[in-house]
Amino acid sequence: MRHVIALDVGGTGMKAALVGPDGELLHQDRRATGRDRGPDAVVAAILDFAADLRAHGEQRLGEPAAAAGVAVPGIVDERAGTAVYAANLGWRDVPLRALLSDRLGVPVALGHDVRTGALAEGRLGAGRGADRFFFVALGTGIAGGFGLDGRVEPGAHGFAGEIGHVVVRPRGIPCPCGQRGCLERYASAAAVSEAWAKACGDPEADAADCAKAVASGDPNAVRVWEEAVDALADGLVTALTLLDPRVLIIGGGLAEAGDVLFAPLREAVQTRVTFQKLPAIVPAELGDTAGCLGAGLLAQNLLTTTTTAEVTP
């Protein structure tokens, strides 16, 4: 199997790699999305970046990439290959798979950024060997991906895994989605940063500062942290009740707090389960390479599918 192009498109920057058949990152690069110039400029930047990666493969590896995988934020129709909507990039209904395929001349897979990261964690990271896992990314918002037998379920309409919009505090804080009391309004890195900045009186304070204050025993920080952990545990118990995963993988910026997060979170989940089976709760392993590695897996899946189709009578 030849190398593939992997692109992980974020709100402000893009991470990219050429990935070998064994998952080795043969070449890595980063660029700005250029979102300040509008959605058309973002799409153009993605296409140009992918074309440059193809050229690099030809020049340095002796052949062009055989396929490409792209992970993007927002609402994604993976089957149609359409980037439906992303508030932070400003685009709507972009036929990104077709645009990239035309530009590169190879098959292209399009995936949701968190589900793509979940795929990588499931196959290459903290979920290795687990037949069912649930990956949760605690970042500016909260989203997840349910892994089942080597793939991540997108849902009927591309919305599977949106655990950040499970209501954990009825009639609570308003959420931009239109509901009140959503999990991400209490347990995301952004929510903890907001709560801690207010509690400590420093508008520049963030979730990492809160975690350090918790470790030092600051009672205000402990209160803010406990409220976030309690909300997160409520959301996770809902997920494990519905999905019965073998492993819960926690990633994103908030997970970088390590045992300051995981020790109380494991205890909080354990105290809430009744009939449910308690899964292992583990930190993600791949960090910010998960998106690129997952995009590479999506691309390699295309090659495997093509090869199988070619040899099947």
Image (tube, helix red, strand yellow):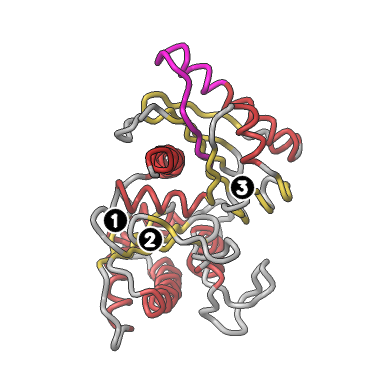
Select label 1 or label 3 by which is in front. 3
Marks 3/2 in contact by CB < 8 Å: the verdict is no
Disc 3 marks a residue whose amino acid type is Gly
Density class for disc 2 (Cα within 10 Å; few <14, some 14-19, many ≥20) is many
Please identify the residue farthest to the bottom as the structure is shown.
274
Residue 154 is inside the magenta segment: no
Question: Residue 290 in the image: x percent, y percent?
Answer: 40, 44
Q: Residue at point 46% right, 57% down?
A: 207
What residue is disc 2 on? Answer: 147
What stretch of residues is rendered in magenta? 52-70
Disc 2 marks a residue whose amino acid type is Gly
Residue 66 or residue 288, whichever sits in front: 66
What residue is disc 3 on? Answer: 81
Q: Residue at point 33% right, 35% down?
A: 23
Question: Residue 49 in the image: x percent, y percent?
Answer: 58, 26
Relative to 47, say whether 252 is above or below.
below
Question: Residue 35 in the image: x percent, y percent?
Answer: 69, 38
Q: CA distance from mark 1 to mark 3?
A: 26 Å
Density class for disc 3 (Cα within 10 Å; few <14, some 14-19, many ≥20) is some
In the rendered image, which quarter contains the C terminus? top left
Q: Residue at point 51% right, 36% down?
A: 7
Whether residue 101 appears in this view of the structure is yes
- Image quarter of residue 259: bottom left
What residue is disc 1 on? Answer: 127
Please identify the residue farthest to the front as the structure is shown.
313
Q: Which mark is residue 101?
A: none
Task: Give the structural element (helix, strand or loop) at label 1.
Answer: loop
Task: Give the structural element (helix, strand or loop) at label 2.
Answer: strand
Marks 1/2 in contact by CB < 8 Å: the verdict is yes
In the rendered image, which quarter contains the N terminus? top left
Residue 23 or residue 247, whichever sits in front: 23
